[in-house]
Structures are given as C-alpha cells and as structure tokens.
Image: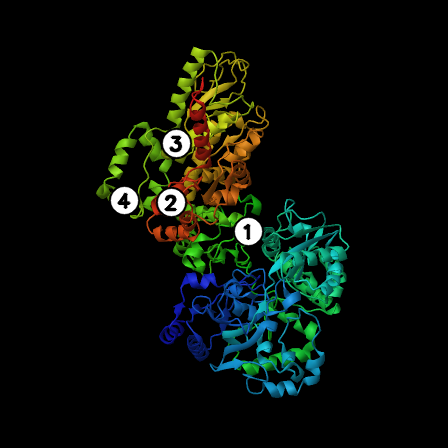
Amino acid sequence: MDGLRAALVADVRGEVAFDVTARALTTMDASNYRRVPLGVVCPRDADDVAAALSVCRAHGVPVVPRGGGTSIAGQATGTGVVLDLTRHMNRVVALDADARTAVVQPGVVLDRLQEAAAPHGLRFGPDPSTHSRCTLGGMIANNSCGSHSVAWGTTADSVHELSVVRGNGSVVRLGRDWQGAPPGLRALVEGELARLRTGFPELPRRISGYALDALLPEKGADVARSFCGSEGTLGVLTEAVVRLVEAPRAQALAVLAYADESAAAEAAAGLLPLGPLTVEGMAADLVRADAGLPRGGAWLFVETGGADAAEARARADAVVRSADVLDSLVVTDPAGQRALWRLREDASGTATRMPDGTEAWPGWEDCAVPPARLGAYLRDFRGLMAAHGLRGTPYGHFGDGCIHVRIDFDLLTADGIGRFRRFSQELAELVVSHGGSLSGEHGDGQARAELLPKMYGAELVGLFERAKDLWDPDDLLNPGMLVRPHRLDENLRFAVLPREPVDVAFGYPADGGDFSAAVRRCVGVAKCRTTSVSGGGVMCPSFRATGEEAHSTRGRARLLHEMLAGEVVTDGWRSTEVRDALDLCLSCKGCRSDCPVGVDMATYKAEFLHHHYEGRRRPAAHYTMGWLPVWLRLVARTRAAGPVNALASVRPLAAVAKRLGGIAPEREIPRLAPETFSRWWRRRFKEQALRMMREGAYESGGAEGRSGEVAFLWPDTFTEYLSPSVGQAAVRVLEAAGVGVILPPTVAMRKRKPQAGEEREPQVGEEREPQAGENVSLSANPWSVGSRGRVCCGLTYVSTGQLDRARTVMRRTLDLMGVFLDPDIYPQPPAVVVLEPSCAAALRTDLPELLHDDPRGARLASAVVTFAEALERLAPDWSPPSLDRPVAGQTHCHQHAVLGDAADRRLREAAGLTGSLAGGCCGLAGNFGFEKGHYGVSVSCAEEQLLPAVREATDDTVLLADGFSCRTQLEQLAGRKGRHLAEVLAEELDRRGRARGPRQGHGGA
C-alpha cells in the first residue's frame, strides 16, 4: 500500500489520503453494504483522473468513482482507491441559454446547476429527492430520474455528450453515431441486433443492466446514452454536456387523497394524459398526522405548470376534477408547496423507521413496473412481504410505476439474512412477472446485479459482460458491480458491529437503549451535506463552513460506525480521528430535527467525550466553560462581579486568562451582571411584601387580574448571572398576562416514610432522618428538609461530555423539584418556563435521556415550556401590545430542533412583529464558539444567514435573539444588540405604563 500511495502522490496533483479518517468516511454509501478502501484520491481534473487510473492499473488496484455517496445499491463503495470527484471537479463550466445546454463537471451538485439555469428560465429535468447533495456524475452513473420524470424523463434523456477516461487511460468523447465507442463494441452490437431489440422491457423506468439497446442503429447508436447507468464500471466521467428544459413560470400542486396506496397507484396512470409534471405517491405510514394533507390513507402529489399562476391552477383543478378521490387540496403558494414536497423528499429517510420504531432498510428501493400494472403489483408485493413476515412502507414515482420501499429486514442474524436473500429472489421474479425492471432509478449495484439473469436471461447478461470487457479489459473500474457481481448478502455493513449492547450513559430510548442502533440510524441520505439552508433549517453548519465530509453529520456517524466495528478505527472510545471529527460539531441539535432519520449527533458527541476523557485530563475549556455554573455562582456569592469585569477589561490579563482557560483569543469575555436575577427577585419580593402590608393588597406587575395560573420561572445560568434583564422582562410580561411567577425551590423536600412506633413530630429545618425507635407524626408534617442548592439543567456539562457530573447536577435538580414532580401531589406538574432555549432543550431531552432510570426526569421534561408557550397555554386570552415593526435575527437552533417555534411565531404575529427569522446556527453555540481553534468556523456559521440578515435590517427593525449565545455573537461580530422577545414586549408594556402615568401598587419589573 505504501508503494501505491507514493506513486499516487508523485503523479496526482490533487489530494491523496490513505489515513484512517479518509478510509472510514468512504466505507459506505446509502446502501446496506460496506467495503474498506485502501485510500481516497481527490483529482483536480481529467489529467489527474487519468494519472490515478494509470497508477492503480500498474498496481492491480481497482478504482471506484464517487460523487455524493448517496447511492442506495452499494455501487459507490470499493476495496481499492476511491475517486472523490466532489472536492475539485465540481463546477458548472458553461451554460448556453440559447442552445439550452450546460457543460458540467461530475462533482457538481444538482442544485448548483439548477441555480445557474434558473435566471434563464431553464432547469435540468431530472431531480431526485437528494437534489441538494447528489452530483451530476452520480446521476449519470445511475441514470437517476426524480419526481419530474413523467415530464422530462431520466438523466439519459438529458445527456448530449460525455467526456470519459477509460480504464486503460484513454480519453474519449462519447456521443451519437458510435462516437467514442471502444474498439469492438460496434461489432458486438451488430452481431446481436435481434437479441438487443427483443431483450429489454419497454417501460419508462428501466434502469437495470447496461443500456446496450441505445446503440441500436434506429436509436442513433448513442454511446453517451448507453454509458448512462453504467455505475462507474465502464469509465470515469470527467465532463458532461447536458440538455436543459424550459421551466414552467408557475406551478400548482394538487394533492389527491385515496383510501390506500393501491387505489392511488391504480389512479396514477390515468392522470398521465393530462400532462402533469409529477405524479408522486405516498401512504399515511410515512406522514405525520399534523402534516396538513387532505383526509385519506394515501396521496398522489400531482404538480402542474403554466405560463402564469392562473394557468397552473386551472390545470391542477382539472386534475382534481378528473380524479375519483376521497378528498383533495390544491396549493399555489410556493412556500406551501415546498413544505409538502419536503414530506415526500424526506421519505427516503423517514422510511428507515417503521411506525413502531423498528429499523427498515433499502435493498428493494426502486423496482419499477409499467404504470398501468402498478396497483396489481403493489397488492402482490404486499402479499409477498406478508408471506415472509416483513413490513415496508412503499412510496415513490407512481406515474412512472416506480416504487421506493424500506423493509424491516433483519440483517444482523444469519436467519434474517437468509430471509433477506430468499425474499429478494422471489421479489425479483414477481417484478419480472409484471414486466418490470429490478431497478427503476438507483441502479443495480450489489443489491440487485446478482438477480439480473432473472430479468434478462443468461445470454443477455453474458452480452453485458462482453461489453464491460471491451470498455475495461483489466476489470479496473468498480469490479463486482453489474457483471460478475458480488452476492447480494455479502459485505453487509451491519456484520462488523458488536452484537451486545455497548455500555453507554444516555438511555437512547428511541433505539432500545442500544448505541449501535442509534449510530445505525444514519443510512447515508446525506441531507446534512447540503451547502445552503432553506426553510429555516439548521443542519449541518460545520459542514457548510468547511465543506469536509468529516464535519457532516453523516461523516461523524460513519466514523462512529467504524469505531464500533474496530477494523479501520482501532482504538475505540480513545480514537483521535473520531474526536477530531466531533470537535467541530456545534451540538446545535439541528440533525435531531432536520435529519430524516433523526440522528442526534450532539448526544453522540457528548457520549463520546464522556468515554474519551474518562480517567484522563480534559481540555482546559471543559473545566472553564463546562463548569461555568460553578464559577459564576462563586463570583455571585463573593459579590465579585465588579472586580472580575474590571480585570477582564484589562487586555493583558484577559489574554492570559483566555490562554489558560482554552478560550479563543479573538473572543471578548462577556460581562457579568452586577446583580443576579435571583437577588433581584428576592429584593423585589421584599419590596412587594412591604407594600402589601402597607396597602393591604397586592397588585402584581400591573396585571388586570390573575388568570389563576402559577408557573415556575427557571433561573438558568445565563439569565441568572449574565443577562438578568431577560428574566426581569419575562416576569413583567407574565404578570401582565395574569400569570403568577415563582422561582424553583432551593431546598429539597423529602417525603418521610412511617416507621414503627413513630410519635415525634419532626422540626422544620431538620435534615436528619428519624432514628430507629423515634416516633414521628407524619400527619402533622410528612416532609423533611433536605439539601440546599440551585436547579440547573446540566447543559454545560453535557456539551463537554462530563456526563457523571451532569447526572449529579440533574439529580440535585430533580430533588429540589421533587415535591412538584410527585404524581400523588401534582397529577400534572406546574409549568416550568425556561427562557434560554438551549437550557429548555436540555431539560426536554438531555435530562430524561441521561437520567432514563428516574421517572421524575420525564415529568420535569413534560412541564418545560418556552416563554411563548407559557403565554399561550397559561394566558390564552391575553393579547400582547402591538409594536407594528419588522424583525430580524435567527431562530435559536435548539428551539428549531427540539422545542419548536410555532408558539413564538404566533406571539410575534399577535404583537405586530412582521417578517421571519433566519435559519441556520449563529455559530457561537454555547462553549463551541468560545473554544480555542473554533473562531473561524464560528464566524463562518454566523456569516451564512444571521449576519447578512442583520446587516440588511432597517433602523426600526427589532433584532430578536432569544439565546444568550446568539446575542453575544451579534454583539461581538456585528456590534448590534439583540434582544429576547420577552424584553421587547416588556419594554413596550413599560412604555405604555409610563404614558398612562404611575400605577398604584405596581411591583415593578
């Protein structure tokens, strides 16, 4: 291997990586298969590709071209050298609007081509659901299609010419009339004309095998078209000339509801004469109940186009009239259409979990039959699954007869793998009996190539082998795919994982407590590799900042998979490769909501750090920022905020402190509040008590009358010590809405248990337990006073992987809240209002998942509400003051991922705050942006959406940032002050109160 690597380094100008990380990242694609490569080469151009092939040919090492790694049949994995064509060969080289063509490199992502074509009113026709990360090279290799294939066909229909490097190093330009064909190919075809004319089924989605019929004389002997779908086995694409189509000026989406998927499938073919752009189908088991779809058990998504919105709408209405449906919906609003299409696009990930949480896998992801036979085929398909005791959730391109499905195969045991093989063989026969193709979009790969004789017969498959040998006589390119294939039950990626559960700290409730199952969630859909955020999404900010696979959610999941496997990453939890990949994870939790399969890399990171540093010294930042609540509490107790702020303002002293504390030198140390929120609360309470004694009544915060609701206001670390003004404002608004506000207890109350002969009544404040023989009157006082302390969500300890300390802090919190979490006393715990989104998210998710053995954790999590949720739930009749101003800023990433912002949007709308907040992540993300070495990535994340949105804001725009990190990032990078929504509302309430004059009995916030 050393000689191969040295030769590649000498001859290739691009990167050559044979290290553990590079190999681990490319062991898998989005399929069930895994192969460990020797190394990865990132060629800069066609010359580099030729050089790499020459070296590998000389060393007898196979080569696998790879694009976005989203292939579902295993064809983007291999044991030799992987060519990563996304790093450098990723440009739209030219675009000719008049000719409606574009010249692209193989590594360009489809969405980048669509963006280049859009200003000219053009687009590339095929659009797989992975359009935001799949590459044109991969689409050509698999002959991809997408939802618009009923209108614009497959990728092969859009290819004009291809530049290819063959396995022998020759560079050819492929086109019609035998252009670029290898020697002997024409003679092979002309000697088998009868077989080629009769051996291929006629259907719109026939992708399986080599498209040798495209070389027939009546089809123009189109070598470029024939090359499409060859899965990197015939040559390496270096450039393509593709055709573009005119994009409709307007679209409408008709959603047609049917009783079940078979009814929807049978209706699909009848809609094709109406000329729709899409006819997509999916059933209820892939859709949330609140998805907003019309009433039914399955749906067709039928898109129509037109010169204007009216024409598109009219065509959609015509579709509805012609369809016999249970219910229907026509959507013309672009945002509404995008939201519905996301349901369909995310199905490739959503389908990996059955409704009961059982894992489901590809393998029969995209077989296709003639559209008119789809309904009958689906019924037979369901019957076959039932006969094998399997379940799946079909969806897909109903208008083209192409079905996607993930099936709950057991790929971990010998019996389950045997069933997988038997089912695959029988399903292949079923597909062929309906006149179908084993692959209708994603190619054969290892998943189906072994079964091609069932579809084509041995003679035609033999013809495929002869064609492969003419293109690639050394069998250098992607061997084992399409011809002379690997068995479909070999190289399964699950075989290397541990069979016994791994000892972990978190509970992983959605994965049965199994960390391996949690890591298996990542199936390689790669939504985390999108290079832009749309629709308010977050995932994955570090990938967008660096462009490195290792810093994507998928890349990190791959490294964790290999860590568990122990073959490539050999040092387990001590792995520096995994640690370095996780180092730039912002723990934004965006993947928890944005990943279609719910990968939660923030939790995996905390788990890994917990084990990685167990018994070892940690980075300085873990002690400074991980233990931030302790240090800030110490400062508050000693009333040293003033001196600390003064010392931090002295640059040389601050520089030393930052260096010792592992803090980025570019960062300013935030100032501590001179008075903590709790101290303000106590002072205010005393003032109100005195006023109440003087006046004989108490008016709280200007409320017109209490709603009867009382809520805890959580004094999180950031509100308590760094921005108490947020807490003060929240008190003012909540009380104005008629909600009584109290702080969580600082003393734990314990329930006493009766013992024989108890008579003595315990004294209030007594902390000791009754001694044997003591008599205690429990009816008088069933409680004992326990330890003192402050509630804390444990966030800073979780984010730095100090999970033992986090559990201690969380258990103390549950003890302090214990009375209110006792179901015998409070069947429904009082609401706990948490102002800091990251702390609310920690209480909602981290605490119950880390203390999975303590039912109090789940009860506390269920009581947590955001500020907006509190107002909506506890004061539903209250109306906020109207501000009538635009807003800018960013939805906190934890709010987006865990808490949801629907209540916030409704509150902003009610307050007359117009506009929407940006997506993405601010980049500071708690301790992340403060840690040494993270500043550059932190700034890049902020520059993606937050800072541009703030720069574009007008002077009267309200800058909203509910998270302390977001406000700090704004202040330090933009010099602008962001505010919590509570502060904005409180300021307006105060302004109106001052305008009306002083109020009697005002407690004042």
Element on which disc 2 rests = helix
Q: CA distance from mark 1 to mark 2?
A: 36 Å
x, y (%) of residue 259? 75, 51
The local crowd at label 1, few if under 14, some if 14 to 19, many if 20 or more residues have their Cα within 10 Å, is: some
Local SS, label 3: helix
Dot 2 corresponds to which residue? 969
Separation (CA) of disc 3 from disc 2? 18 Å
Check disc 3 and give the amino acid type. Pro
Pick whichever of labels 3 and 2 is earlier in the sequence: 3
Q: Quadrant of residue 19?
A: bottom left
Residue at the spot of label 3: 724
Q: In front of the other: label 1 or label 3?
A: 3
Task: Specify the amino acid type for callout 4.
Answer: Leu
Is residue 791 in view?
no
Position of residue 778 measured from the top left corner of the image (x, y, whole percent):
53, 15
Chain-order first, disc 1 or disc 3: 1
Please identify the quadrant where the C terminus is shown: top left
Whether the residues at callouts 2 and 4 have beta carbons within 8 Å, the answer is: no
Whichever of labels 4 and 3 marks the residue nearer the N terminus, that label is: 4
Mark number displayed over residue 517: 1
C-alpha separation, residue under disc 4 versus residue under disc 1:
39 Å
Disc count in the image? Answer: 4
Residue 62 sits above or below residue 632 on the image? below
How would you rate the neighbour count of disc 2 (Cα within 10 Å): few for under 14, some for 14-19, many for 20 or more? Answer: many
Q: List the residue tagged with mark 4.
A: 660
First of labels 4, 1 by sequence position: 1
